[in-house]
Image: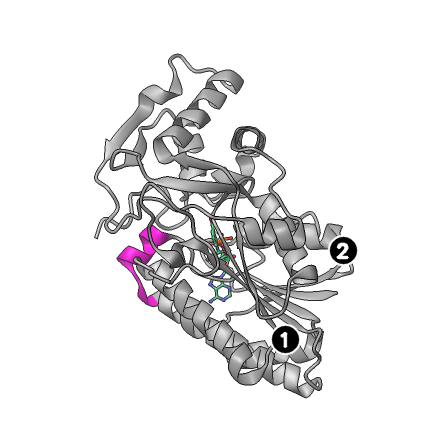
Amino acid sequence: MKLLVTGGAGFIGSAVVRRAMADGHSVVNLDALTYAACLENVASVADHPDYAFEQADIRDRAALDRIFSQHRPDAVMHLAAESHVDRSIDGPATFIETNVLGTFHLLEAARSYWNGQGRPQDFRFHHISTDEVFGSLGEEGMFTEETPYDPRSPYSASKASSDHMVRAWQETYGLPILLTNCSNNYGPFHFPEKLVPVVILNALANKPIAVYGKGENVRDWLYVEDHADALLLVLEKGKVGRSYNIGGENEARNIDLVQMICAILDRLRPGTRPYASLIEFVADRPGHDLRYAIDPARIRDELGWRPSVTLEEGLERTVRWYLDNEAWWRALLDREGVGRRLGTA
Ligand code: NAD
């Protein structure tokens, strides 16, 4: 297939681009190159004849129309978004503009192109979303595809809004859509403002490792390359109009995750004292959801997908990747907001 991947210079989008190319698809990578983007993430495929890059903003309808008519994709995988909850607390406007309005413009551009092609039923608009749209769980229970939406941060509210529009475009216009809601990703090429890389890099720099609140918030951790595999499987085999929850089957409290990373570093790059001694508890994030957990029964039973790595294995691979790729992350430390506490409201 020829895939139009939006946000393909970001963390998950670049994993999708690399995996799709390895699977033999052609890829048009559409990305505005915001602070979160890094073209090195796709350097391994950049010279391939089946790869093209378009620097464009999903809020720019004219650019989207030109890209659709020039490249004539068989499917869209929509990952472009503002993605950092802490930044959404400080500045929600760009989240609404990109995640809500940008998705609207992309849907409209896709619909216009699809109509012009004679409404092919094998066209797909695959929207990649988050489990954060479902809100916060207590100690028990899991999110299923039927869990009511209950977003609680500007980020998750903007993603929930985009999910509703994507479903509405299928119901109203017949656009063949797919939707996935996944849990917290981690892995290589993760931008150094998110928890896992921040812990690794602060530890290596011998700086305090800040843990919000008491570190009791629970997340279900999904290795990014497993996620990319799942997304391509849903694209190829998922039932039109259906949504699929994608989880890592790896629930962990933040404090336990941080301790695991410190223990891996103690083994791979021992310091003068255990890295866990750098942990500091700091004021919690406003509106910090207590627990997310994904029930992955649908994607497992219908499509036969399960994550391939445990949290221990995935974290070890990730830590090794950061140790081996210092030039990649060092270049990003100067970007606006990186290394500072954001989102204290
Ligand atoms: P990211 O922030 O690493 O990358 C986002 C990419 O989108 C960047 O390359 C950026 O330049 C691009 N982009 C931003 N605004 C744009 C615009 N207006 N026009 C065009 N491109 C634009 O994000 P990520 O972590 O890779 O997340 C990708 C998608 O997956 C997002 O939709 C996010 O909501 C979703 N998601 C992420 C996670 C996670 O744990 N990271 C979990 C669930 C869902």
Task: Tell me whether circle 1 and circle 2 mark residues in contact (CB < 8 Å).
Answer: no
Q: Residue at x 70, y 77 (%)?
A: 121
Res. 46 in view: no
Q: How is the image coloured?
A: one colour
The residue stretch that appears in magenta = 85-93
Q: Residue at x 75, y 59 (%)?
A: 25
| Label annotation for residue 335 | none
Q: Residue at x 46, y 72 (%)?
A: 102
Q: Secondary structure at mark 2?
A: loop
Q: Main secondary structure of the magenta part?
A: helix
- Image position, residue 138 (x, y; %): 31, 45
Residue 265 placement, left or right of 50 = left
Q: Where is residue 306, by image quadrant?
A: top right
One can see residue 4 in this view: yes
Three-letter residue code for mark 2: His
Mark 1, other Cα within 10 Å: few <14 / some 14–19 / many ≥20 = some
Check disc 1 and give the amino acid type.
Answer: Ile
Give the crowd class for mark 2: few <14, some 14-19, many >=20 residues within 10 Å: few
The residue under label 2 is 48
Who comes first in sequence, dot 1 or dot 2? 2
Which of the pair 39/287 is nearer the observer?
Answer: 287
Task: Please tell me whether residue 276 is drawn above or below residue 314 in the rendered image.
Answer: above
Is residue 91 placed above or below 190 in the rendered structure?
below
Residue 103 screen position, x and y as percent: 48, 72
Q: Quick check: is 289 in the magenta stretch?
A: no
Asked if residue 311 is positioned above or below residue 277 in the image, the reply reads below
How many numbered callouts? 2
Residue sitting at x 27%, y 28%: 280
**In what quadrant of the picture does the N terminus appear?**
bottom right
- Identify the mark at residue 67; answer none if there is no mark: 1
